[in-house]
Amino acid sequence: MDAGGKGPVLVTGGAGYIGSHAVLALVDAGWPVTVLDDLSTGFRHAVPHGVPFYEGDIGDGALLDRIFNEQEIEAIMHFAGSVVVPESVADPLAYYDNNTGRSRALIAAAVRAGVPRFIFSSTAAVYGMPEHTTVTEDTPRQPINPYGWSKLMTEQMLADTSAAHGLDVCVLRYFNVAGADPQRRIGQSTTGATHLIKVACEAALGKRERVAVYGSDYDTPDGTGVRDYIHVSDLAAAHVLALAALAAQPGRSLTMNCGYGRGFSVLEVLDAVDRASGGRIERVMQSRRAGDPAALIADSSRLSATLSWEPLYADLDTIVAHALDWERRLEQGSGEGNAPFAPGR
C-alpha cells in the first residue's frame, strides 16, 4: 500500500458504463487504478489516459496472475458481466458462464494472489418479486431470472470465500442506474441499451421512434411501474467510500443497497425527459413483462449510515439532464476520447 494508504485497485469491466465512472471516481480520489476489460460492451476510450489497461477476460487465470503481480493489486472492484434480463432468460448458460463461472475464476485468482479486498457489483434483481415495495438488505433473496441468480450465486461464493480465506467483501446491490458524469467525461455509450432513461433520451433526439411502456395497469399512481433511479456518479462515489471503509477496518464484510429510497414511474421519467428536451416522446402502451414488480425501491439507510454516503445528484431532473447531455455529445460525435482525465479537472 502506498504512503497515502491507498493500494492499487483492479477494476474489471472498467471500460463499461458503471465501471468507467468508478474508475474516474477512484482516480479523482487518488487511488492507483488498473482496468481489465474484454471490450465486448466497453470502450477503450472510456479509460482515462495514464491508467494501466489490460484487454482480456476475467476468466483468464494466467492473465489475472500477471496483472496482480505486475500491478501489486490490493483490491478488486468487479463490474464485468452481462446485465440484460430478457437475454439471460433466453440464454441462461451464457449468463451463468459469464457472471458466475468467470467470477469464480476471478475470486480464485484473488485468493491465490492474497488480494485482501473485493467489491462486487450486484443487483436488486436478487430480490425477485418482493412482498413489500421498499426492500432492505434482509429482504428475502428470491431471484426470478438467470441474471438475478447469476449475481446471487456470486454473492454466495464471495461470502463462502470470505469465511474460508479472510477476504474482505463489500456487495453493493444496485437499483436503476442512470445519468452521466457531470464533468462530461463519460456516459452511457452502449448501443442497443435497454435502460429506460437511456432509451428515452435516444427517443428524444430522434434515434428511436417511440418508447414502449410495459404495463399501464399496475397498482401505482399512474398505472406504470415505479423504480428507484440512482445517478451513476453517486453510485461510483459509494464504491470509493466502500473501498476506503474496507481498507480502514480490515476483517469485516458489508452488503448494502444502492438507491435513493424514492421511486418514479415510467411515465414520470418520460415526462422528465420531455421537460429536459423540450419535446414530446411518443409512448406506446404494451402488456406487462413477466416478472416485473409494480414497484421496487431501495432502503439505502445502511449505505448512508455505514459509509456516511451523501448523494449529490438525488434528483430525477438532474439525472435526466446529465443523461440527455451525454446523448447529445454522442450524437455530435464528441463522446469518444474528447474528455481524457486530467488531475483537478
Image: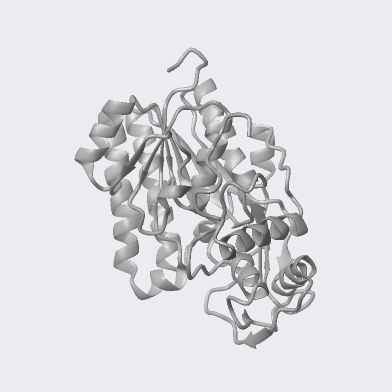
Colouring method of the image: one colour
Q: Nearer the viewer, residue 33 or 295?
A: 33
Percent x, y of residue 153: 38, 53
Image quarter hosting the C terminus: top right
Furthest-top residue in this view: 3
Does residue 242 appear in the picture of this structure?
Answer: no
Residue ID at (80%, 68%): 275
Question: Where's the N terminus, which quadrant?
Answer: top left
Residue 74 visible from this viewpoint: yes
Residue 225 lies, with reference to residue 250, above or below; the image says: below
Q: How many marks?
A: 0
Q: In the displayed structure, does residue 3 sit left or right of residue 233?
A: left
**In which quadrant of the rendered view does residue 14 lie?**
top left
Residue 170 image position (x, y, % from top left): 49, 38
Residue 22: x %, y % from top left: 53, 42
Quick one: 339 or 108, which is closer to the camera? 339
Q: Residue at x 45, y 48 (%)?
A: 45
Q: Nearer the viewer, residue 76 or 307?
A: 76
> Relative to 224, does residue 104 appear above or below in the rendering?
above
72 up-or-down from 157: above or below: above
Could you say where residue 7 lies in the image, as x and y percent from the top left?
44, 23
Q: Residue at x 58, y 48 (%)?
A: 137
Residue 228 relative to residue 143: left or right? right
| Quarter-of-image position of residue 90 | bottom left
The quarter holding residue 298 reads bottom right
